[in-house]
Amino acid sequence: MTRKVHLKRLTLTDFRNYASLALRFDGRHVVLTGENGAGKTNLMEAVSFLSPGRGLRRAGYDEVIRNGASAFTVFAEVDGMEDEVSIGTGVDLAEETLSRRLRVNGTPAKSADELTDHLRVLWLTPSMDGLFTGGASDRRRFLDRLVLSLDPAHGRRASDFERAMRSRNKLLSEGRFDPAWLSGLERQMAGLGIAMALARREMLALLVTLTERTADGDQPFPTATLALSGFLDDAQGVPALELEDRYAALLVEGRYRDAAAGRTLEGPHRVDLLVRHREKDMQADRCSTGEQKALLVGLILAHAQLIADMTGHAPVLLLDEIAAHLDVNRRAALFDRIHALGGQAFMTGTDRSMFAALGERAQYFTVREATVTEESL
């Protein structure tokens, strides 16, 4: 039985266009409607700060602070995975280091990874609609976000890998081919890089197993066939230590080539996520815009189900402008799937009528110029 994780209260201070805001939720889904620019997505972004990272917009923290203010705070009371918990986070421009502060039940957290002990947050925004036609870096970031929601240590491994790679690139660019120094960095990159690659591969295998188990011929959303390409593609089933040795050797062999290129040419930072429309056996980037949107929705829903299955707690979903490009039947099917997950979803749109199929399963709020008002059914 999946236990429902949901926000009970959300309080903002000097966040984007909100000088101050306090909202209470009753555990149902949350629908935010209003004109473009009213602040709907800003509210979703605030909720996304209850997870590690820079939120759904990946904005600099100084961009999030309301104009004229010097700090922002986000505070939430959550019926979480371990119990009820209060989470507070924010940034103060007066501090020497512009980093996000985090408190859990009033106590400073050691790292943002602690947030995943209490809730997992997934999101789908209009900016992701070009995921399949955009650059590989966008798909890698999307992939790593999926991994992070199941493996909280993945983010730290990725940042440590990037740090070691930058140090190696700097040495190579300066012509400092010190064998001991470079070998130390390359062994570090090999350990971290293979751990990243295996975590990605494991997550994809779990997702593929889930979609195979639940696939049928009458699904409202197409099934995505997933694969990875670009790093040790022939290494399926090879032990991790052997892969580390192989990658370290590639780095040693590639020193002069990487120095000439000005970057490291082999590694997990070069991976691409390959997606196909299973039912049509077609690459995702060749599908119509509507099919690509449906593929992406189906992928997010499948991943949300995987989190629920593995943790026993459904994630909080942030679905920005989710109903805009779906017909009436597919919208109704989407809402049924979201509700069946057993979690809480925040959804935005310009027209409340698009959410009619949700009925009493949601709370409805109207957003106008940074003012949020709860509406009756």
Image (cartoon, rainbow, N blue to C red):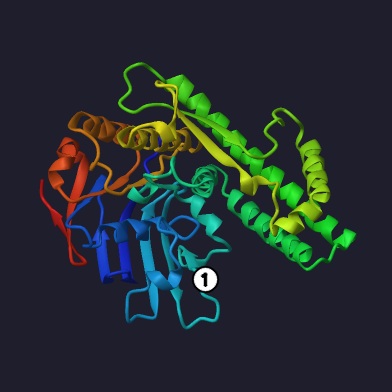
- Disc 1 on helix, strand or loop? loop
Residue 183: quarter of image: bottom right
Q: Is residue 39 above or below residue 362?
A: below
Residue 177: quarter of image: bottom right
Q: Residue visible at 41% across and 26% down?
A: 223
Q: Is residue 242 above or below residue 142?
A: above
Identify the amino acid type marked 1.
Ser
Q: Which residue is mark 1?
A: 99
Residue farthest to the right? 179
Residue farthest to the top? 217
Q: Position of residue 352 (x, y in %)?
A: 14, 47
Residue count near mark 1 (Cα–Cα under 10 Å), binned few <14, some 14–19, many ≥20: some
Q: Position of residue 71 (x, y in %)?
A: 40, 77
| Quarter occupied by the C terminus | top left
Q: Residue visible at 43% across and 42% down?
A: 133
Does residue 1 appear in this view? no
Nearest the eye: 171 or 372: 171
Seen in the image, is 199 located left or right of residue 90? right
Nearest the eye: 323 or 287: 287
